[in-house]
Image (tube, helix red, strand yellow):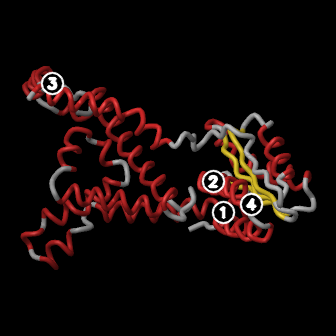
């Protein structure tokens, strides 16, 4: 709790706050970081393998293999979410599964499953992008801002 | 039962090196043991040889492979991991260096791994099947088109 707020509390409340702080379970931050690092790393290695697969067996170059790789990884995570495996991995690895592009597929499908009981249109259809919508919105917006900055820098800043 | 199981495992292990050898096909995909050029009676690959020798002298290049005809030169190279931060500059340098060295040739360069594999494959084919100049030209054009693809 912020210091500002703590000043407004009564002495009993402050005492309780200290009492509670001593007893609450500590967040294993370092352990979580390691888990996220390794599981996230494994997912990225898998992505690299998929990318090499597309390059080796199809006419994709390093440049063009990115798109089908992303599609495959999102699709795989969607399937794994559907059969309930991805949730278990996410429980273990936390951000390691949410940060890579596979987290996007998980966000879409888990929202769809959650609202399945409300019907296909108002349930699944309306809520599917409840979580992933923000990813799309801010992704597009960030890309727009970056493109704007680059355009200005190249046109008038003399860069590039 | 246990003996049979152990026996099966032993047989499995005994065959392993052979399988491994087959799967690797005695060839490293990134590092090439030869000088990275093809030699045929019909199409001399001396231009490709020279280009590979020149490019391999650079400190930031791990490996290079090239094929050439009388008019065209295709060179694919692998940039060392930490040098990849300067990828754009390296690509520009190599293109300019080769254009200066071989002014009569239409030079195509690429740092793409796919192009590296394909060029190496083409080099092997030229060496083995003694392809005609026209056929090599056509293959080089095809690879050039592939290297220019962006999406």
Disc 1: host chain: B
The answer to whether A29 is drawn above or below residue B100 in the figure is above
SS for dot 4: loop
- On the image, the x and y values in percent for residue A155 come to 73, 64
Residue placed at 76% from the left, 58% from the top?
A: B74
Residue A11 visible, this orientation: no
**Disc ID at residue B147:** 1
Question: Residue lying farthest bottom?
Answer: A121
- The residue mark sitting in front, 4 or 1, is 4
Q: Is residue A23 left or right of residue A136?
A: left
**Neighbours of disc 3 within 10 Å: few (<14), some (14-19), many (20+):** few
Q: CA distance from mark 4 to mark 2?
A: 26 Å
- Name the residue tied to disc 3: A21
- Residue at image position (28%, 31%) is B11
Query: Pointers 4 and 1 in contact (CB under 8 A)?
Result: no
Residue A146 point in image, percent of width and height: 56, 59
Q: Mark 4 highlights which residue?
A: B130
Q: Which mark is residue B112?
A: 2
Q: Regarding mark 1 in the picture, which secondary structure is present there?
A: helix
Compare marks 2 and 1 and give the one earlier in the sequence. 2
Quarter of the image for residue A159 reads bottom right
- Out of A24 and B74, give the one closest to the viewer: B74
- Against B46, residue B11 (above or below) is above
- Find out whether the residues at labels 2 and 1 contact each other: C-beta distance under 8 Å: yes
Q: Which is closer to the viewer, label 2 or label 3?
A: 2
Mark 4 and mark 3: span between their CA atoms?
Answer: 79 Å
Looking at the picture, do discs 2 and 1 lie on one chain?
yes
Q: Chain of mark 3?
A: A
Gap in angstroms between the C-alphas marked 2 and 3: 55 Å
Q: Are marks 4 and 1 on the same chain?
A: yes
Asked whether the residues under the numbered discs 4 and 2 touch, taking CB atoms below 8 Å apart as contact, a structural biologist would say no
Front position among marks 1 and 3: 1
């Amino acid at each position: 709790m912020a210091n500002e707020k703590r000043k407004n509390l009564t002495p009993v409340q402050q005492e309780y706050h200290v009492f509670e702080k001593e007893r609450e379970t500590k967040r294993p931050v370092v352990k979580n970081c390691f888990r996220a690092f390794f599981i996230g790393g494994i997912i990225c290695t898998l992505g690299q393998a998929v990318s090499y697969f597309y390059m080796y067996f199809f006419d994709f170059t390093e440049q063009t293999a990115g798109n089908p790789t992303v599609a495959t990884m999102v699709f795989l995570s969607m399937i794994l979410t559907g059969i309930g495996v991805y949730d278990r991995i996410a429980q273990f690895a936390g951000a390691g599964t949410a940060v890579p592009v596979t987290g996007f597929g998980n966000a879409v499908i888990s929202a769809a499953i959650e609202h399945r009981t409300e019907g296909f249109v108002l349930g699944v259809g309306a809520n599917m992008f409840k979580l992933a919508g923000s990813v799309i919105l801010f992704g597009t917006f960030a890309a727009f801002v970056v493109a704007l900055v680059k355009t200005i820098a190249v046109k008038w800043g003399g860069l590039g | 039962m246990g003996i049979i199981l152990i026996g099966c495992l032993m047989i499995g292990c005994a065959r392993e090196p052979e399988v491994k050898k087959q799967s690797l096909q005695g060839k490293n995909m990134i590092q090439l043991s030869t000088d990275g050029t093809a030699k045929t009676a019909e199409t001399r690959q001396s231009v490709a040889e020279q280009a590979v020798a020149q490019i391999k002298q650079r400190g930031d290049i791990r490996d290079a492979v090239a094929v050439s005809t009388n008019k065209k030169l295709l060179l694919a190279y692998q940039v060392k991991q930490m040098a990849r931060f300067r990828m754009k500059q390296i690509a520009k340098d190599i293109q300019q260096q080769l254009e200066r060295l071989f002014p009569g040739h239409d030079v195509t360069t690429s740092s793409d791994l796919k192009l590296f594999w394909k060029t190496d494959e083409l080099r092997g084919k030229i060496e083995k099947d003694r392809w005609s100049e026209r056929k090599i030209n056509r293959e080089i054009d095809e690879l050039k088109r592939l290297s220019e693809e962006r999406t």
